[in-house]
Structures are given as structure tokens and as C-alpha cells.
Image: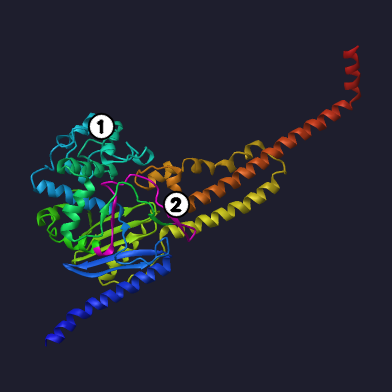
Amino acid sequence: MLAALLLATATPARAASRDIDGYVRAHLDHTGLPGAAVAITHNGDVVRAAGYGHDAAGAPITASTRLPIASLSKSMTAFAVLQLAEAGRVGLDEPVTRYLPGFRLADPRGAKITVRMLLDQTSGMADSAFPDLKRPQPHTLAEAVTRLRDADLADEPGTAFHYHNPNYEVAARLVEVVAAQPFADYLAGHVFRPLGMTGSTSVDTPPAGTEGYVRAFGIEAGVSEPDWFTGGSHGVLSTAEDLAKWLVAQRDGGGAVTPVSAALAHTPAPGRDYALGWRSRDGRVSHTGEWFSHTAAQVLLPGGYGVAVVANIGMAPDNEAELLAQGLASLLDGGTPEPALPAGVIADRVLGALALVAAGLAILGVRRARRKPRWWRIAPPLLPLVPLVFLPQLLGWVFAGRRGTYAQVLYVWPGLVLALGVVALAGLTVAAARARALVSGTRGRDREESDETRGDPQWASANRRSGS
């Protein structure tokens, strides 16, 4: 009887593990994703913690491979703040300036920002008012707070949600000051160690050798992570093994925080969906993360399952770690998901086709440019230059107001940049050919008119009389 009971309880776990492995490998094969780390838990048990594929150096990704989890880090920063709140050292609804006197914005309303507003991202700070990606990057959390003295607010504090990394940079600096130790050390000693996350650490900038991939037209290319500030907001490096422990800790705090604080981290204010480092939608609690060379996702399902994925392809029109996590969540919910191509891959195919069409039309346009050129036909081929010139601003609308540089756009969507470049170059070539033909035609007509005028006897007679 005991053997039968053990078999009955073990078989579903083994079956689930096989199904997970099969789905992840099918996803990698279908999408071309080079590698991923996956952690899946059920209540207090680890169902699967494993690596798949390879990293940018060609080494196999394993359960102990350390990878950047990007903005999943925010949920860990929130745990750190909640610990200090439990100890009575921080009040969530107290002004940030009570703990960070040096926290000053250009907008005087910044004095109203509370600790909770940082964590639920309702401080009023926003990329539209302070595009931090385009600014010189700080090197420390102290510098990250100091540079906000030039920041305006997009809204009255507490009234609107704006996803903005500096919120969590300020929160991490608050932890540093209140705990009187570096933020990375505090996380290591008070969050990671109690949860057994021995392979996790936090960094202010991507360490040397952090390489992943970007994709253009279905081709993956290895890239190094740019040098940008990640502290507090998106700087944790972790493993599949540690992420499994992190997911288990979400049930009751895992001893790092109390069950009440763990529940608070997952519960948004009425009328909102962003809590404290987590987003709650449709019964699921989740968060995604994006570096330029990696993506990550974590989700807690109503049935007690937890899923975390880190993929070594960077931010793009869609988060590939999130796509894989969604497929795994559907599988765990009893569905039969089929791996699907990321929208960015499909979009690149369309863009590539348009670029080829534009090149063909350019060849045809150059050949026809000599046929009765008109000045008004020069301008239309130059129109593709407009979106190319304003591409960072245009993509800022797509990516929730986040504005970056051209170099960053090239990381995020190289296929779009290359396709637009081809289309713009094709248009420029046609416009130049038409302009050249127009100038040549005008000069030719002027010469013909000049020759005809010189051959006119009346003109010659008039010319002799004027010279006599």
C-alpha cells in the first residue's frame, strides 16, 4: 500500500518534468532561442530547475548558471524594504526624504513621495519627464539619487502609475542608508542567505563577460551587455536553482519576510494592478525583466504553481522569456500549448520583404528618372528618412514612453533599423537620380535654347547693332 501511494505521488511529478522538458526543448527548436534557465515550483516543492541550450560562449546552460534576471530584481528590492518596515526602521507611508534627506527633485512636489509610492511606482517620476536611459549613467546608488535633482514629475505623487527604474534605485539607496551597508551586501545577508539563494548576487553595472544575443531576420547574434546602471532596479544575477527557492518563498515569505508582507507584495491598491515589485492580473501575479542581452519572467499561478524563466535573448518587441513562461503556465494549467514564433521574428520577415521591395523599386526608379523629370517627384522618396531620424522617439511610444539612444534601439530591434535604413537609402537613391536628371534636363534645355538663339539672324543683327 505504501509503495502504491509513493508511486501515485511521484509519477505526476516525473510526468510533469518530462512534459516541461519536452515543451522547453520544442520552444527552443521552433523559435531559435539559444538558451534558457527554467524554474518551476508547486506550493513548497521544486518541480523543475534546469538549464537548456547554450550561452553566448557556447557553454551549456545548467541549473547553476548565473544569469541576469533584470527587473525581476524589483521584487527582491521590495522584500528588502519590507524587512526594514517590519523592523520598524522604515514607514511605507512616510516621505522618502525622512530617510534620504538628499532626495530632491526639480519639481518641489517630490517632497510628497512616500516609500510605498516608490515600490508601487506611483511616485509621479516617469521616463517622459526624466528619460534616464538617455542621460549619463550613474555609477553608484548615491549618484543615481543625486542626479534626480534635475528630474521633473509627470504627475502628482500617488495619482498615476509610471513604470520607471529610478523608483527602485531610490528604494535601494534607502535600504543602504537605513541599514548602513551596501545594498548588494544587504540583499546577500538578509534576502538571499535566509532563502538559500547562494548563487545570487546584485550588481550596479553588468559585469565583464555578460553576453547574450539579439536577433535580426531570424538570425541570432552574440552581443555584450552595454554599460548601464542596474543597481536596485534590475541588477540581480541568479540561477534556476535559486529562482526556484525564490518562487517557493512567495507562499509565506520563506522566513525573509512575514506571510503578511509577502501577501502585501503581491496585492495592488484598489483600482491598480501593480503591487510592490509584482503585477497582479487575471488571478496571476507576475513580473517581467529586460536587459539588452537577456530577458526574464516570473509568474505565480492560482493553483500553487510558480514559473521563472531567464532567456539569453535581449529586449525586443516581445519578451521571449515571458513567451516561454506563458507557454509553461498554460501547460501547468492543463493546456496543450504549441510553441509560437515571437512577434518580432514575424515582423522582421515582413520588414525584410518590404526592404527587398524597396530595393527593387529603387532600381526601377533610377532607370525611369530620365523620363520627363519633375521637381515635385524628388520629395516623396525621401519620406522614409523621417521615421529613421525619429526612430528612438517613435519606439518610445511603443515601449511605454521609454526613450533611448540609437545604439540602444539597434540592440532592441536591429531588424527594424536595418530595414528602415535600406528603405531610406533606396528612397535617397531615387531622389538623387531624379534631381540629377532634372538638373541635367534643365541644363540641356538651356543649351538648346542658347544654340537656337545664337543661330537666329534677327538675334545676330540685333547683337551687331548693340555692339556698334
Q: Quadrant of the C terminus?
A: top right
Q: Which image quarter: residue 289?
A: bottom left
Q: What is the image's colouring?
A: rainbow
Is residue 41 depicted above or below 69 in this figure?
below
Q: Quadrant of the N terminus?
A: bottom left
User: Does 133 sit left or right of 163 as displayed?
Assistant: right
Q: Disc 2 residue type?
A: Trp
Residue sitting nearer the eye, 60 or 451: 60
Is residue 226 depicted above or below 113 in this figure?
below
Secondary element under disc 2, as helix, strand or loop, is: loop
Q: Residue at x 71, y 39 (%)?
A: 437
Q: Which mark is residue 413?
A: 2
Is 224 within the magenta? yes
Residue 268, image x and y in percent? 18, 50
The first of marks 1 and 2 along the sequence is 1
Residue 423, image x and y in percent? 56, 48
Secondary element under disc 1, as helix, strand or loop, is: loop
User: Does 246 sit left or right of 26 as displayed?
Assistant: left
Which residues make up the magenta segment?
214-241
